Amino acid sequence: MKKHVAIVGATGAVGQEMIKVLLERNFPYQTLRLFASKQSAGKKLTIHNQNFIVEEFHDHCLNNIDIVFGATDALVAKDIAKQTKLNHALFIDNSSAFRLDEDVPLIIPEVNSSDFLTHQGIIANPNCATIIALTALQPLHAYANIQRLIVSTYQAVSGAGIYGIQELQQQIENIAHQHPIQIQHFPCQIAYNLIPQIGSFHDSGYSEEEIKLEKESKKILHDPSLLVNCTCVRVPVIRSHSESIYVEFKQPIDVHTAKQLLQQGNGVRFIDQNDNTKYPTPLDTSNQDYIYVGRIRKDPNPCVHALSLWCCGDQLRKGAATNAIQIAELSL
Amino acid sequence: MKKHVAIVGATGAVGQEMIKVLLERNFPYQTLRLFASKQSAGKKLTIHNQNFIVEEFHDHCLNNIDIVFGATDALVAKDIAKQTKLNHALFIDNSSAFRLDEDVPLIIPEVNSSDFLTHQGIIANPNCATIIALTALQPLHAYANIQRLIVSTYQAVSGAGIYGIQELQQQIENIAHQHPIQIQHFPCQIAYNLIPQIGSFHDSGYSEEEIKLEKESKKILHDPSLLVNCTCVRVPVIRSHSESIYVEFKQPIDVHTAKQLLQQGNGVRFIDQNDNTKYPTPLDTSNQDYIYVGRIRKDPNPCVHALSLWCCGDQLRKGAATNAIQIAELSL
């Protein structure tokens, strides 16, 4: 039976990507309605040659909808949840509002699809950096059990939405014309620069994004004892996130085995560094659904079972939209 | 007694920075001669309002020179060393030619200046990523003894010299005008991209740059048992390198103590993250001699004495030219 589907926040970077992915994967919807704020209501979106008119999100607008995808901030997500609860609809939320709630499963289909069975109306889509890291690591985790992660990220400006992409491009253009640059959505200049801050800082010194990666990884892997140390950095790249990951396992695993596991991994493409120019880059991995893994190496510490690797994945696709649609597919 | 000084490779990014730093620090030279390849001979350089004429580097050109700074590749460095040996001159070499030679000290003045006493005519300037990491870490190492480093770098295009800077700028310009880009000095596009390769790969999977950081750190800290796991990545930034460093110590050290040590550290400026926007960025730390450290945090593993931090430093200044001049100052 085909579903009545809605996307709330449809005009944002993730919302538009959700429309694309629903169409590309032939998601079996009977109706697809797009909602956004008052300012965007009436706007026409043309995606993959199909036209959509954006409606205003308001109370009761989600009546008769079976599956709602949320691509909004956490506040709006709570409004959506009130409506989907009344309507007994399934709400797949990309915001951080419910990710750590005990009765809300947090799902990467390649990693913990069985958590789908426990949902009570809401399923949370993890943070993009978490999805990319754990999709890359899952084939290794299934074999040797991760016990510790030390991650340094290189995160694209698309993580800050359409305005993030525009801000980088505008700054680059202004610098080229020797005009003063404008800083609006990032804490400081991102063109030709790096910003080691994503979200505000907690007392521990870790940023919100770093804490998300820690707490979400523990929840998804069902392992509160997992050790995660993360440094999240914004880089002047458009839309694929990259991560330099040190991973320590409970059981032994060698580089050769890891390569074989990654070659067969679900949702993963392994790039073997068998010559001098083969590894994933953010540019090569944009506009794709796979997480690309390469540069796999043994850590020199003989006392641990540890590897280092490099992975890249499109932040708007598998890091957000594709993962949300995959979750919805579990309901079909 | 003032010295007769020469720079070989004076027209490159590091060579020109060496001239600047010699002038700025009032290095007591009697004569300063600049050498480069045949193509650059006769070229006029104006630096800090002083004019210099570049001479061709050839056999015997370094007769009567007391101190030679090398800013060339490893092959030319070996030619320079032959001349400085005959002339009993001091050769401070920025290439990788002699860095791991047993009878050549490898010096960061803030870290191991006493190694100067052991030199036999050649002193090697470490790799830029090594200088930046160890200058940042030395105040902590003196207190608690480093036993392990896991480093992810974010390295500026200036590390590939003047042509590296030009290639990034040209690619950005071509993309803006929708012209095809050219790839000459980097293995792939660097504009809006990241390249997880600096130097060629060894069989272990580690790149030359990663192995330099490992081997040079062991030599400088006189600790062959030091564990170093490095991932080196080129980023579209002009001239400051950044590094995300996980550091494990032999003795306990807490964040508060680490901050105090860094505040008093030699060659280091500590940026305390006491509000939401205080941390070093490559842009803020360019054209300066200090290594800036911030974002210091405790690692969550209770079984180790470990911290994470973020540091940035100008790759051409302290990462190369300034460190070389500081080494020469030890001879005065």
Image: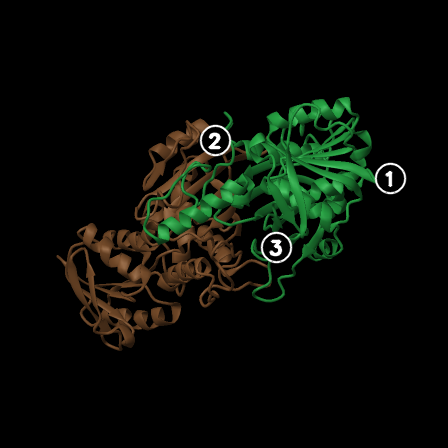
Chain colours: A brown, B green
The residue identified by callout 1 is: B1
Q: CA distance from mark 2 to mark 3?
A: 40 Å
Instruction: Tell me the SS state at disc 2.
Output: loop
**Place of residue B51 in the rendered image (x, y in percent of width and height, measured from the top left):** 67, 46
Residue A43 left/right relative to A160: left
The residue identified by callout 3 is: B285
Front-most of A94 and B35?
Answer: B35
Front-most of B87 and B331?
Answer: B87
Residue name at image x 48 percent, y 36 percent: B197
Give neighbour class at mark 2: few <14, some 14-19, many 20+ (Cα, 10 Å): some
Chain under disc 1: B
The answer to whether residue B303 of the structure is visible from this angle is no
- Which image quarter: residue A86? bottom left
Q: Amino acid at mark 1?
A: Met
Instruction: Tell me the SS state at disc 3.
Output: loop
The residue identified by callout 2 is: A253
- Which image quarter: residue A87? bottom left
Q: Is residue B156 above or below residue B279?
A: above
Say whether marks 1 and 3 touch (CB < 8 Å): no
**Place of residue A128 in the rendered image (x, y in percent of width and height, measured from the top left):** 39, 54
Say whether marks 1 and 2 touch (CB < 8 Å): no
Q: Amino acid at mark 2?
A: Ile
- Which image quarter: residue A62? bottom left
Give neighbour class at mark 1: few <14, some 14-19, many 20+ (Cα, 10 Å): few
Chain under disc 2: A
Q: Earlier in the sequence, mark 1 or mark 3?
A: 1
**Place of residue A110 in the rendered image (x, y in percent of width and height, measured from the top left):** 33, 45
Front-most of A271 and A301?
Answer: A271
Q: Are marks 2 and 3 on the same chain?
A: no
Front-most of B195 and A218?
Answer: B195
